[in-house]
Amino acid sequence: MPAYTFVDQPGRIVPTLESHARIGLDTEFMRERTYFSQLCLVQVSAGSDIYCVDPLVDGDMGAFWSALSRRTWIAHAARQDIEVIYQAAGHMPSALFDTQVAAGLLGMQPQIGYGNLVNELFDVELPKSHTRANWAERPLPDRYLEYAAEDVEYLLPAYDELAERLEQKGRLAW
């Protein structure tokens, strides 16, 4: 289980975000009871740090969203993450590297899941026990936050590995 920091004042991590060109990103949201998804948690890996950011807090998140959108997002199957962040904050990434798309360009299993990709690249099994958790629950249980942190723990190392393989095949620009 990775070490992580729970963040209920997102503005405090802006300097950390701004010191990294690339960040790993994932979200947890609820879609079952609303027409538009409710963004409930944003997980960010920046260097060796992992943050679980609570977007349901009262307060200004503008500086956080702005800093986040100026980074290259490393995400897995990013369509829903982008959609829910855009709906919640009106921000898009300045650039995106989708590890699922990259894996497909390398001939790996089509639409490979994040857990399977991590297993293939790093021989690590990720538990997927809280996929259907109530992410709107507050306070979030530690077990949910640990699960959420695992969802970004390997995104930056996966980027490094996949980008190197794509470069070797002349496909990184794709």
Image (spheres, rainbow, N blue to C red):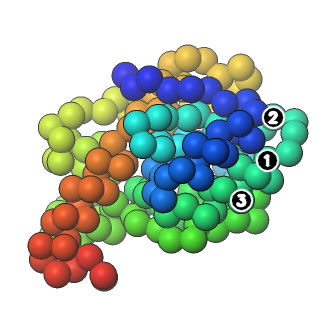
Marks 3 and 1 sit apart, C-alpha to C-alpha, by 9 Å
Marks 3,1: beta carbons within 8 A: no
Marks 2,1: beta carbons within 8 A: yes
Q: Secondary structure at mark 3?
A: helix
Give the amino acid at mark 1: Met
* Residue 134 in view, yes or no: no
Residue topped by disc 3 = 66
Marks 2 and 1 sit apart, C-alpha to C-alpha, by 9 Å
Depth order, front residue of 119/16: 16
* Residue 98 in view, yes or no: yes
Depth order, front residue of 115/62: 62
Give the amino acid at mark 2: Val
As drawn, is 2 to the left or to the right of 109?
right
**Residue shown at the point (87%, 36%) measured from the top left:** 58
As drawn, is 66 to the left or to the right of 128?
right
As drawn, is 63 to the left or to the right of 32?
right
In percent of width and height, residue 38 lies at 73, 48
Tag of residue 57: 2
Of the numbered discs 3 and 2, the one sitting upstream in the chain is 2
Q: Is residue 110 above or below residue 74?
A: below
In percent of width and height, residue 20 lies at 49, 52
Q: Residue furthest left?
A: 168
**Residue shown at the point (30%, 82%) measured from the top left:** 174
Residue topped by disc 1 = 61
As drawn, is 75 to the left or to the right of 31?
left
